[in-house]
Amino acid sequence: MDAFDDRSPIYLQIAEGVRGAILSGQLEEGDQVMSTTQYATTYRINPATAAKAMGELVEEGLLHKRRGVGMFVAPGARERLRAERRANFFADALQPVLDEAILLGITTTEIVNHIKGEK
Amino acid sequence: MTTASTTSGATAPLGVDIAGLSYRFGSTVALADVTCAVRPGTITGLVGRNGAGKTTLAALVAALRPVQTGTVLVGGRPVWEDPDVTSRICLMRDKGAIVEDERIGTSLRIAAMLRPHWDGEYALALLDRFEVPVRRKPQQLSRGKRSALGAAVALASRCELTIFDEVYLGMDAVARRMFYDELMADYIAHPRTVILSSHLLDEVEDLMEDVIVLDRGRVVAAGDTDAVRQAHSRPGELASLTDVLIQLSTPSSARSAS
């Protein structure tokens, strides 16, 4: 209940949570992910909701199922996610920030200096 | 928790198929040409405002009333006067299914005789958890404890189709949380079909795989709960079932005018 927000269906949030954990390395390749039963009892959600999230991740090739054992992070999952997100980084993550900068009259030099100063 | 004692035979969750179902109380239309289905093995929510027809629908599915017009099939069979089917359906609401003026033990013994998959140990564990004084008669219990008793009997009956019609009445927030936890744990351990009718939508909407929304005796939305909620959402914000109900229910002003 409290672990999720009201912006999107819980199954999408669960899937995004697992993707985030794979990207950050919190879940490594070969690691077992929480079972749908654990999700259901931990967060008081229908097990089908968690199963939908897992199904989506299996379809994306990020998880694979070992029958009777559970779900595991697939080999190459992290690299695949990184490649995908990298491809979209400039359009999805950076462009909105740059659009905002233009609106606010912040120059390219200011932005570059800020980034360099941070490092 | 639980101590799952051995149950007799394998259980197969029962689906419900309703077609062209209408029901009247005198000149009052309770259900008007309802066609819907409950998929076997799901937890399906039955939601709607007061007077929408939830309780009548539940009573017809559980064969507490004979059908007037239309068909109700449970597990593919008509339910009326078929004990083979009705022994596998449990409807728990604020009244009935419990012997009010005899000790709780009597109701438990009756359930044990009636219900093929009854788990007596589980029933006692639940009553203990809900702190129901088992030596009392149900009519001596507070509203909340009486509801907890009903919930415990319904859960321990392990019926292939279990219907909870506002079973939470009088339960405090902690008891309701316990009920949801027990329902989910036992549903996972012993898969069955559950129909959950409640007004506390914020508390139960995430428990429901499917939902049926009624308004003035008609089905106004049905299907996968996420899909129904998304269909009534604005971008960037998922509609709650309360939002869905507000959008789909006839306003009171229009009701009194009709």
Image (tube, coloured by chain):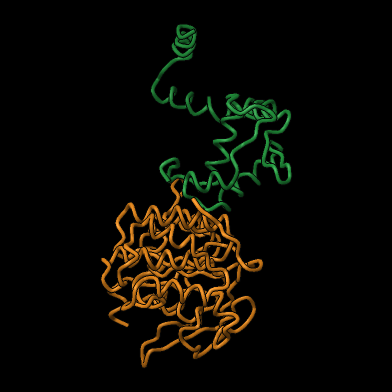
Chain colours: A green, B orange
Q: Residue at image x 46%, y 65%? A: B196
Q: Does A39 appear above or below B213? A: above
Q: Residue at image x 40%, y 20%? A: A105
Q: Does B12 appear above or below A76? A: below
Left or right: residue A26 versus residue B166 is right
Q: Does B43 appear above or below A4? A: below
Percent of width and height locating residue B235: 47, 48
Q: Nearer the viewer, residue B202 or A119?
A: B202
Percent of width and height locating residue B258: 32, 83
Q: Nearer the viewer, residue B85 or B112?
A: B112
The image quadrant that residue B168 belongs to is bottom left
The image quadrant that residue B190 belongs to is bottom right
Q: Nearer the viewer, residue B187 or A78?
A: B187
Left or right: residue B48 versus residue B188 is left
Q: Residue at image x 28%, y 74%? A: B139
Q: Residue at image x 36%, y 60%? A: B200
Q: How many marks?
A: 0
Percent of width and height locating residue B230: 50, 54
- Residue A25 visible, this orientation: yes
- Residue A90 visible, this orientation: no
Q: Nearer the viewer, residue B4 or B220?
A: B4
Percent of width and height locating residue B39: 60, 67
The image quadrant that residue B27 belongs to is bottom left
Q: Does B50 appear above or below B232? A: below
